[in-house]
Image: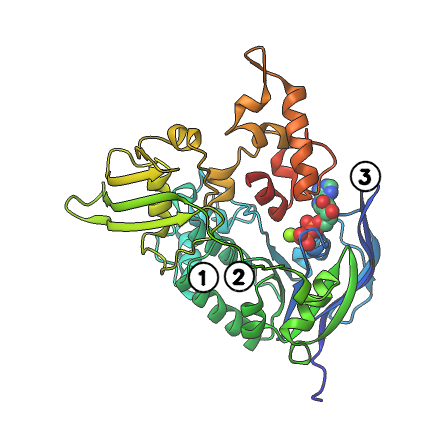
Amino acid sequence: MSQQPPVALEARKITKRFAGVVALRDVDLRLYAGKVNAIVGENGAGKSTLMNILSGVYADYEGELLVGGGAPRHFASTTEACRAGIAMIHQELNLVGGLSVAENIFLGREPLTALGLIDYPRMRREAAEVLRRLRFAESPDARVGALRVGQQQLVEIAKALARNARILIMDEPTSSLAEGEVAVLFDVIRALTARGVAIGYITHKMGELAQLADYVTVLRDGCLVHAAPARELSADELVRLMVGRDPADFFARGDHPAGPRVLEAEGITLRDPARPGRRLLDGVSLHAAAGEVLGLYGLMGAGRTELLETLFGLHPAEATGALRLGGSPARLGSPAQAIAHGVALVPEDRKGDGLVLGMSIAQNTTLAALGAALRGGLISPRRERGVADEWRARLGIKSHSARQPAASLSGGNQQKVVL
Ligand code: ADP
Ligand code: MG
């Protein structure tokens, strides 16, 4: 076996509790200079918590951190971690929508003029330089809130790059990126490792492991179950380690006959409101039967999202075509109509379209089905919580109460609330 590269960051015996719940127990981890260590594990395994500790987000934890083989330390803030050369790109983006791209990149450490004012030209110039490395298409002056999620993700990465981090932690960075953007990100990661940057990369995508990972660290229920060079583990072994049982047992995939057609769409066409004469969808027909999973494939921009949005009644003014739901004609009129027909849409942008982050799990769960929460024509918080508690149990939503705001959940658990 080849020589071990230098250890950039070592975590020893990390234990972390949240209000009595143990999120991590005695976890060891090493990130190597110039290498990608993929941190994998199921939802709630403790991946984000561990990476948050490495980047100074939590001050109260047990265990110690060693940077570049130095003395053991304990980070009390992200500023301390940042000074030690560690930056993290969070799963839930940390951007200020009302500020420009450049302002976000330099937030809290803006370059100043001799007079002590923000040196905007310099900020813009340096931002543009980092953004060029990421092949970011928009202007550094663009307002972040107006960007697509994928581009916002690139701004987060630019923020870390502009800090010249030697250790870069990424929490599921591709979850909202388009294919082209993923390719750019992987190029950036390779360029960074070639310069000796150590990368901690949280993912649950097997394809990414094969393309990127030099090392793999597997967490399960807050414990370290395996750490090894990536090439020593097969995909099957990895999944077994992550889940703790055999992959063959996961999906009992028996044959079952398809039921009647519940969704029939004929000649769905969607005009592009921004470009008269252009069509986003042009005569799409499909049908799905009860008990069937229908896959929709296509590149970014091919119209996948628009098709589902149209079927859900989100584009009544631009859409034409025939729709039958449950065998009866239906209109592409409004989400309320679609919901009344038993159609639900889990949108692409979980935080923007799927949830009201400041509302509780209970309120979010019943938001599209208020009928279930009504009592005497008024919303009953108690009913709301009753419905939410049932789904918290059925979907295993890791949370301590249905009153908890959706914003406080991990990304995977937020997704379960959307479902
Ligand atoms: P992963 O990133 O692997 O999905 P997390 O690190 O987000 O997992 O979560 C690990 C465990 O810690 C989960 O049980 C989760 O519910 C809990 N947890 C994470 N963050 C918090 C928090 N801020 N408050 C309470 N519990 C939390
Ligand atoms: Mg996570």
Q: Considering only order in the chain, which callout, 2 or 1, is on the residue closer to the N terminus?
A: 1
User: Is residue 130 depicted above or below 156 in this figure?
Assistant: below
Which numbered disc covers residue 130?
A: 1
Q: CA distance from mark 2 to mark 3?
A: 34 Å
Residue 201 image point, x, y percent: 61, 64
Residue 185, percent from left and from top: 48, 65
Give the label, 1 or 3, closer to the camera: 3
Mark 3: secondary structure: loop
Whether pointer 1 and pointer 2 mark residues with C-beta atoms closer than 8 Å, the reply is: yes
Q: Helix, strand, or loop for circle 1? A: helix
x and y, in percent, of residue 82 in the image: 65, 56
Q: Nearer the viewer, residue 92 or 246?
A: 246
CA neighbours of label 1 inside 10 A, class few (<14), some (14 to 19), many (20+): many
Q: Is residue 313 visible?
A: yes
Q: Is mark 3 within 8 Å of ligand 1?
A: yes
Can you identify the residue that label 2 sits on? Answer: 161
* Pointer 3 local density, CA inside 10 Å: few below 14, some 14–19, many at least 20: few
Q: Which residue is mark 3?
A: 19
| Amino acid type of the residue that numbered disc 3 sits on in the rendered structure | Ala
Task: Determine the residue located farthest toward the left in the rendered image.
Answer: 277
Asked if residue 262 lies left or right of residue 320, the reply is right
Q: Are marks 1 and 3 in contact (CB under 8 Å)?
A: no
How many marks the image carries: the answer is 3
Secondary structure at badge 2 equals helix
User: Which residue of the protein is positioned furthest toward the bottom in this rendering?
Assistant: 1
Q: Against 385, is 308 above or below?
A: below
Could you say which is closer to the camera, residue 259 or residue 172? Answer: 259
Q: Position of residue 253 (x, y in %)?
A: 58, 60
